[in-house]
Amino acid sequence: MALKKTHKLFKNFFFHWKLWKFSIIVFVFMVFLFLLQREVGVQDFKDEGGIEPVVGKKSHVLGLVLNAMNNIKGAKPKMQIKAPVRQTKIPREKHCLPGHYTAVELKPFLDRPLQDPNAPGASGKAFKTINLNSEEQKEKQRGEEKHCFNAFASDRISLHRDLGPDTRPPECIEQKFKRCPPLPTTSIIIVFHNEAWSTLLRTVHSVMYTSPAILLKEIILVDDASADEYLHDKLDEYVKQFQIVKVVRQKERKGLITARLLGASVATGETLTFLDAHCECFYGWLQPLLARIAENPVAVVSPDIASIDLNTFEFSKPSPYGHNHNRGNFDWSLSFGWESLPKHENERRKDETYPIRTPTFAGGLFSISKDYFEHIGSYDEEMEIWGGENIEMSFRVWQCGGQLEIMPCSVVGHVFRSKSPHTFPKGTQVITRNQVRLAEVWMDEYKEIFYRRNTEAAKIVKQ
């Protein structure tokens, strides 16, 4: 019934429109004929040279009338049957020069001061703790209890130490980076909670000594409600000398996930690069990450993570021969692990500059386009404190059109601790809750396998 009424309504509309259009055409035609007749009547026919000028005037007027009719015809309203075509923004191409970046263009933000080759831990070597007196032994023990690494050794190693010669494979050292598309800028985001002074500041200095000035937008230190006094006013005063470094703080401890989101919210770089607070960056670490994102904006890229010994702070340098790499995986308890590259992945890669595709990543160190980070919804804000966020982000990226990769030419050292020195405000059960959240959001029917493996998680989901 409604359809018939609608059809009748449209029929009446077009009938009245045609009648109105015909009336306008007749009116315009009569006006022009009247004007033409008046013009001809007041002029002397003979003076105008016969009938030819009149014919010309009539032809001219007739043309005007026909044009008017065509204009009216073109003004006929068109009913919108199909959905309107969405107007898409035409991307503006970035202006960039041909060729490759030069070494001068990629000069680090800061020049590293000259190093004493015999200084403790120089060139990435191990610190030797021998012949300690009783007070030093107590200091060493306190540091290990608080930070779960040898803070005594770290405090005696220069904040500016270099890591010796560049031992990466030749193709990494000689790698060139195209100017077009240009390498994007990045904001380095470092979250800390009661971090040792020396490891935090060595991380910051390491970034500035190895990152090209034209790419390093800022370094954002996010304080997750640290209690140690030296991480308050003293830290603020120290970083004032570097205009590129800023400190933002959470008033109460909310954990890694919320802290990283806070850092991302104030970041102004085109990409976000997350680092832990106890890292050291190797030569040329940043360019391969940003070059890959410039090439593929949905690639989420991690460096090849080298180990910094938690007792001696010896930096495990990359091999010049390469090919000895691992990638991330996970098991049905949703725990992260490492595995050797399968044969097909090794065969796919032609040399060390090629990325390694990885099912999951460690999550502490990676770069991502800020636009893509926001597009996929960033981190899950319902996950708390720490634990499981790396697996969640891995699933999120792969299921939202992206891909996880490791760039072997990008090397960053990391202090791997045997246990976390931090307490959990809501207990360690928060990790299991995060895993339940991950399973419920991303795993569909496969979550049942996880619940069979983790009875505690199965109880939580039934609550």
Image (cartoon, rainbow, N blue to C red):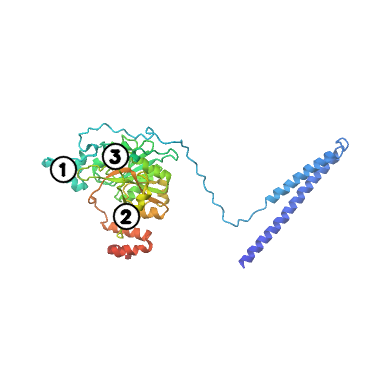
Kindly identify the residue that appears in the image at 27 percent across and 32 percent down: 113
**Could you tell whether 357 is left or right of 44 in the image?**
left
Quarter where residue 52 is shown: top right
Q: Which residue is mark 2?
A: 329
Label 3: few (<14), some (14–19) or many (≥20) C-alpha neighbours in 10 Å: some
- Within the image, what quadrant is residue 309 found in? top left
Residue nearest the viewer, comparing 460 with 400: 400
Q: CA distance from mark 1 to mark 2?
A: 38 Å
Counting residues from the N terminus, which is met first, the one under dot 1 or under dot 3? 1
Which numbered disc flags the more N-terminal residue, 1 or 2?
A: 1
Between residue 260 and residue 273, name the one nearer to us. Answer: 273
Query: Quick check: can you spot residue 266?
Result: no
What amino acid is at disc 3? Thr
What amino acid is at disc 1? Glu
Per the image, the residue denoted by label 3 is 167
Q: Is residue 44 left or right of residue 186?
A: right
Task: Give the image location of residue 277, x and y in percent.
Answer: 28, 44
Secondary element at image label 1: helix
Q: Is residue 339 above or below residue 223?
A: below
Work out how far the residue at label 2 is from the one at label 3, CA to CA, in angstroms.
Answer: 27 Å
Between tags 2 and 3, which lies in front?
3
Q: In the drawing, does residue 328 fall left or right of residue 121? A: right
In this rendering, the answer to whether 374 lies above or below 12 is: above
Disc 2 marks which amino acid?
Asn
Camera-nearest label, 1 or 3: 3
Give residue 322's mark.
Answer: none
**What residue occupies the far top of the structure in this picture?**
114
* Image position, residue 104 (x, y; %): 37, 32
Q: Badge 1 is on which residue?
A: 139
Does the image show residue 307? yes
Residue 426: x %, y % from top left:
27, 56
Secondary element at tag 3: loop
